[in-house]
Image (spheres, rainbow, N blue to C red):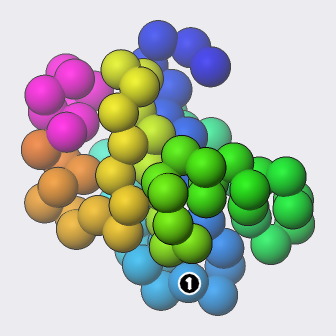
Amino acid sequence: MSATTIQMYGADWCRDCRRTKAQLDGLAVDYEYIDVEQDEAAAEDAKRISGRMSIPVVVFPDGTHQVEPSNAEVEAKLQELSLV
């Protein structure tokens, strides 16, 4: 993962995942989308990172993460990291 790449763990059926993915796309932020439905190990990684089964899990380059974040929470973190 590069110094500016975000990882987003999600699934196509998850409305919050679709919303967060659309937000990142709209802001033209570089991120890696990891589909937990297609990759069982990724689902376990997301659970290990967040400590629970909820998605999306967004992991930022500074090592912090957000679980089921609002658009405002994601944007605030992106601004903090100077990614937008």
Quadrant for the N terminus in the image = top right
Q: Does the magenta stretch include residue 54?
A: no
Residue 69 is situated, as x and y percent measured from the top left of the image, at 29, 64
Q: Does the magenta stretch include residue 80?
A: yes
Q: Looking at the rendering, which quadrant does residue 63 occupy?
A: top left
Single out the residue that lies furthest toward the top. 3
Asked if residue 39 shows in the view, the reply is: yes
Along the line of sight, the residue nearer the viewer: 6 or 84: 6
Compared to residue 50, the image places residue 28 above or below, namely above
Residue 78 is situated, as x and y percent measured from the top left of the image, at 23, 36
Compared to residue 9, the image places residue 14 above or below, namely below
Quadrant for the C terminus in the image = top left
Rate crowding at label 1 as few (under 14), some (14 to 19) or many (20 or more) other CA atoms within 10 Å: few
Compared to residue 35, the image places residue 19 above or below, namely below
Compared across the picture, whether 37 is left or right of 62 comes to right
Compared across the picture, whether 7 is left or right of 71 comes to right
> Mark 1 belongs to which amino acid?
Cys
Residue 11 is situated, as x and y percent measured from the top left of the image, at 66, 73
Q: Give the range drawn in magenta.
A: 77-84
Asked if residue 25 shows in the view, the reply is: no
Seen at 38% across and 61% down, the residue is: 67
Compared across the picture, whether 14 is left or right of 79 comes to right
Q: Looking at the rendering, which quadrant does residue 43 occupy?
A: bottom right
Along the line of sight, the residue nearer the viewer: 67 or 71: 67
The local secondary structure at tag 1 comes to loop
Residue 46 is situated, as x and y percent measured from the top left of the image, at 62, 54
- Total numbered circles: 1
Q: Disc 1 designates what residue?
A: 14
Seen at 87% across and 62% down, the residue is: 40
Seen at 38% across and 43% down, the residue is: 65
Compared to residue 30, the image places residue 47 above or below, namely below
Seen at 61% across and 49% down, the residue is: 48
